[in-house]
Amino acid sequence: MSEPFKNLFNNHVINHMAEHFQRHWQDFDKQGFIDAASHQLEALELKARSQQITAAMSQYLPKDFEHAGQILLAALAPESNEELIIESDGITGWAVMPMGDYVGLHGLAHHDFSMTLLNAMTRRFTSEFSIRFFLLTSQEKTLEVLRSWLKDDNKHVRRLISEGTRPRLPWAMQLPSFILNPAPVIELLEELKDDPEEYVRRSVANNLNDIAKDHPDLVADIAEKWMQGADINRQKLIRHACRTLLKQGNDKALEVFGYGRPKLDSIKLEVHEEQVKLNGNLEFSLLLESTSESDQSLMIDYVIHHQKKNGKTSAKVFKWKKTILEAGKQVSMSKKHPFKAITTRVYYDGLHEVEILVNGQPIAKNRFFLSTS
C-alpha cells in the first residue's frame, strides 16, 4: 500500500528544517519549533501539516522579517537540476511549501525581498501558492516582477509565472481579479506558449483550462489563434488547454480540432447487463453509421449519470475514442466501465444512465441499475 500523501510532512522533515534554521541562527529554539510543528501531526492532513509548520516558523523565527528571510535563504539547499529531495545540504522539496507561506504571510511589506525569496524557493520546489498573497495585495507590482522572469534560464521560475497566476489553482487561494479579467494572465501565457520545456507548457495549458471555466469563448478564440502555424508541442498544449471545452462540446473548440457536427444514422447503444454491482463493470457497445459523403473525424466520449442521495443525477464525462469514420461506413466499439469504490465518490443504489457524446453532441442514452450491496 502506498504511503499517504500527507506523510510528505513528517517528524523527520521537521527535524531536518529545524537543524538548518539553527545552523544559520544560533539563537533558534530548535526543540520549541519541533514540538510546535509536530504537535498531533498524525491527526492532520497535508495542507494542515504545512500550515502548522508555518505557524511554528512564525513563532520561533525572528520577528524582523528581513532577518528571518535571510535565515530562510541561507537554509535552502544548493540549486540543483536533480530531482527535488529532502535529504540534502539544506532544505528543498516539499519542506519549502511552509517556508513560502511564511513569506506570503509576513513579507507583504517587503515586496522586493519577498520576490527574491520566492524566486529562490521556487527553484527548489514551487512558489505557486505563496506568490498569490502578493498577486492579491499588490497585483501590478507582482506582475511586473513576473514579466521580468519570462526569460529566466530556470524552468521552475518560468513555470511559476504560469502556475502562480492560475485563477483557480487547486489547493490555493483563488484570484478573483483574474477570474473576472484574465487579460494580464493571457499576456504572460502568450510569451510562454512555445517554452522549450514541456513542464512549463503543461502549466500554460492548465492555466488556460482554468480560464476556460469562466471565459470559454475567449479560450476557444485563443486556441484558434495559437493553432495557426503550431508545431506538435503547441498543438499538444492547445489540446490539453481545451480539454474542458471539448468535454462540454464547445462548438468553436471542436472546430479548432476538426470535429464538426457528426452526420450519423443507425445509432445503437446497447447495455449488456441491466444491473451492475459495485466493484463490477458496466459493459456497453456502440454502433454508428455515417451519412456523410466524406470522411468524418469523430471524438467519442461517454457520460455516466450517477444517482445521488437526493434522487437527482450527477454527470461525469469520460474520454473514450478518437476515430476516422469513412463516408457511408459503419463503426462498432465496446467498453467496460469499472464501478470501483473510491474516496472521491459515494455510490448509491438506483437507476443510472450512460450517454454517448460524439464531437460534443449527445447521440444516444441507455439505462442500467447499480447495486451497492
Image (tube, rainbow, N blue to C red):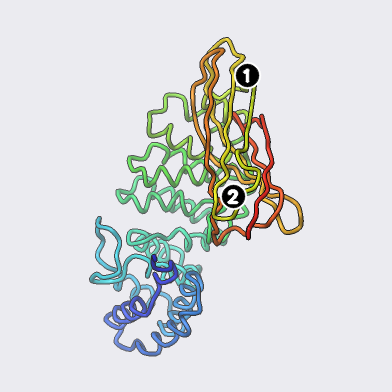
* Residue placed furthest toward the right: 311
**In the foreground, 13 or 315:** 315
Residue 64 sits in quarter:
bottom left
Q: Which residue position holds label 2?
A: 178
Residue pictured at 43% horizontal, 68% vertical:
4
Q: Position of residue 322 (x, y in %)?
A: 49, 29
Give the residue drawn at x 37%, y 78%.
67
- Report, in whole angstroms, how far the alpha carbon at label 2 lies from the one at label 1: 39 Å
Q: Residues within 10 Å of mark 1 (few under 14, many from 20)?
A: some
Mark 2 vs mark 1: which is more N-terminal? 2
Nearest to the observer: residue 310 or residue 206: 310
> Where does the image place residue 87, in percent across and percent down from the top left?
26, 70
230 displayed left or right of 275: left
- Amino acid type for the residue under numbered disc 1: Lys
Q: Residue at x 38, y 28 (%)?
A: 231
* Label 2 element class: helix
Tag nearer the camera, 2 or 1 = 1
Which quadrant holds residue 66? Answer: bottom left
Q: Which mark is residue 233?
A: none
Q: Indicate whether 342 appears above or below 358.
A: below
